[in-house]
Image (tube, rainbow, N blue to C red):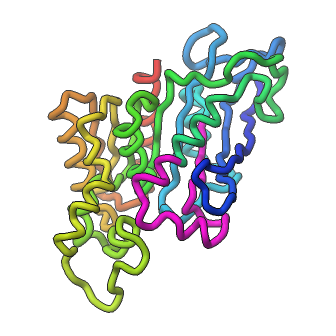
Amino acid sequence: GQGASWRVLSAVPPDSATGVPIEAILLLPPDSFDAKDGAAFCAKKKPSKCQLGLVVVPHGGPHSCTPTSWVGSYAYLARETGCAVLHVNYRGSIGFGAPDLNSLPGKVGDQDVRDMVFATELALELESSDAPEGAEGKAAGGKKLLDRDRVAVVGGSHGGFLGGHLVGQRPDLFKCAALRNPVTNLPAMCSVSDIPDWCTVEALGLGHYDFKGFSPCPPEALPHMFAKSPVAHIDKVCAPTLLALGEKDRRVPCSQGVEYYHLLKARGVPARLLMYPEDSHPIDKPASEADQWVNIAAWINQHLK
């Protein structure tokens, strides 16, 4: 059969102060195109030609990036769900210059969310003829490559933070989520994380944290932190959401995800909670890593129909 194929999407966000484009890597699953006429083919979904679903992936950090290299977990998701995977390097990612890197602190839950939506819409506008190099028999065009009614978000840590924001701020677009050790409530996390400066700097901006000491978060900062948290949008969430949590996580304590799970259940939103007693932030013990990704793939297959 045909192997996976990929391409890099690049565009300048409309509100960019630097004119530097953000980049996103679009991975198409193996055997996703008909060799004869090039039409998109969801072999995992049904035996007829159709548009591909899309799994949007914000990376963690937020000051890291997703390179054009092999990421086994997401290659597995593409293969197992038949969906395309979109890795987004939003503003604040490393590798795009200091001005863009430093533009994000103080604007999390806003600028990075807008960049994620911008990249998602960019991908959703692709036609079958825009398929990546290596996709055999590309169609003549005119038909969208991806199905905007089947879009999921999967992310961990700050990627989980963004996943919670996306299903809360854009429930019309994101229909399913899987969040791995997500940040969901900044005020509740700022004094118990092993990196308390992260909460203050990312929520309030550069220069707001005293690195020479340790103090409780000032009361006047708490409303700003809450407003930038996914829980601020919980009443708008309707996407079925899976949470995978490492019980020994000191970076993002598992209470963040547990609270979010209970908030979803209290509002009648389909939710599932996976707890890994011996795992920390990465959830990377071999049995735990395999279990979470098998369950994430099953969750996407169940809810992106």
Residue 25 magenta-highlighted: no
Seen in the image, is 203 located left or right of residue 121?
A: left
Q: Which of 108 and 176 lies nearest the eye of the viewer?
A: 108
> Quick check: 37 left or right of 189?
right
Image quadrant assignment for residue 179: top left
Q: Is residue 250 left or right of residue 2?
A: left
Residue at point 19%, 41% (across, down)? 263
**Residue extending furthest bottom?**
212
In front of the other: 34 or 247 = 34
- Residue 151's place in the image compared with 183, above or below, is above
Magenta span: 85-114
Q: Residue at x 27, y 62 (%)?
A: 224
How many marks the image carries: the answer is 0
x and y percentages locating residue 140 in the rendered image:
83, 17
Quarter of image, res 6: top right
Picture residue at 82% right of the left edge, 12% below the top: 37
Q: Which quadrant holds the N terminus?
A: top right
**Picture residue at 35% right of the left edge, 53% below the top:** 181
Task: State yes or no: residue 104 in magenta.
Answer: yes
283 to 239, vertically: above or below:
below
In the rendering, at what x and y percent does residue 292 appear?
41, 42
